[in-house]
Image (spheres, rainbow, N blue to C red):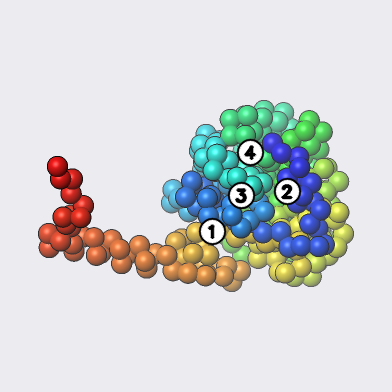
Amino acid sequence: MNRKKITKILNKKGKTPITCLTAYSKSVTEIVDKYCDIILVGDSLGMVLYGMKTTREVSLSTMILHTKTVKKFAKKSLVVCDMPFKTYSNKFEAYKNAKKIISASKCDAVKLEGGKRIAKTVKYLTTKGVPVMGHVGLLPQYAKNFKFVGKSLDQKKKIYEDAIALSNSGAFAIVIECTVESLARKITNNVPIPTIGIGASKHCDGQILVTDDIIGLSDFRSRFVKKYFNVKKFIQKSVKKYCNDVKERKFPSSLHVYKF
Ligand code: KIV
């Protein structure tokens, strides 16, 4: 855990946009770490890496395993681990599991989904010294689909109050997912901690996306994702070439053989 890194993130609010991406492995961590302020080991790994239908199936041991690797290879970024579904049902369970995650992986913080409902838990964790990142708006662990939220006045009010509750409970940052621009702006302007948007407009202090989505490795399509590359195509090309080479006995060539 590194308090200095958290202070650095806090100091960026209103000044410099905070850059965040997900990573689950050594190779992606090494790349993302060079450019990002925060690396999230998101429970999105359940769907992205393991083909699960929802993030609800992800276990604590899986999150610890991936977070250990990410933390080992992240030299400068703040590493945050998502607490899996049903591992923070009450404050005692949350503390026990957050401690497990942090002591096993040495990560810098944990992220929990929810607002007012989990405010007491967040307060308990932060009082005991566990750095917490909040997550409001669309909550993948609870949502039935990935439609944007905050259309009605009631929804807007609820999400706003959720963000305020998290901030008052000691969270050091809040992810705002898939909601309308005006609401993201209102939250960002009214909480003293950084807001990190995903599908929540530029009116946030930082942005996060799933790395596999921006490089075209996942199948996830959404209005809020910008695809910068199509890595899948390049992998396909390489695999096809390799298989052809093997079939045509072009690989291995003399270059790939040990001689003595
Ligand atoms: O699980 C995840 O990757 C997330 C996002 C905010 C990207 O929670």
Which residue appears at 57% of the width and 67% of the height?
225
- Is residue 224 toward the left or the right of residue 251 in the image? right
Indicate which label's residue lies in the foreground, 1 or 2: 1
Q: Residue 60's spot in the image, x, y percent? A: 55, 35
Looking at the rendering, in which quadrant would you find the C terminus? top left
The span from disc 1 to disc 2 (Cα, nearest Å) is 20 Å
Amino acid at the residue labelled 2: Gly
Q: Residue furthest front?
A: 260
Q: Report x, y in % for residue 69.
A: 52, 40
Q: Where is mark 4, residue-wise?
A: 107
For residue 170, say whether it is visible: yes
Where disc 1 sits, the SS reads helix
Look at mark 2 in the image and give the residue it sits on: 134
Does residue 256 lie above or below 100 as drawn? below
Secondary structure, mark 2, is: strand
Measure the C-alpha gap from mark 4 to mark 2: 16 Å
Disc 4 element: loop
Q: Are marks 1 and 2 in contact (CB under 8 Å)?
A: no
Instruction: Tell me whether the residue at label 3 lies in contact with that at label 4, contact meaning CB atoms closer than 8 angstroms.
Output: no
Residue on which the image places disc 3: 40
Please name which of the two marks, 4 or 2, marks the residue nearer to the observer: 4
| Callouts 3 and 2 close, C-beta under 8 Å | no
Residue 162 image point, x, y percent: 79, 52
Mark 3 close to ligand 1, CB under 8 Å: yes
Mark 3, Cα crowd under 10 Å, few <14 / some 14-19 / many 20+, is many
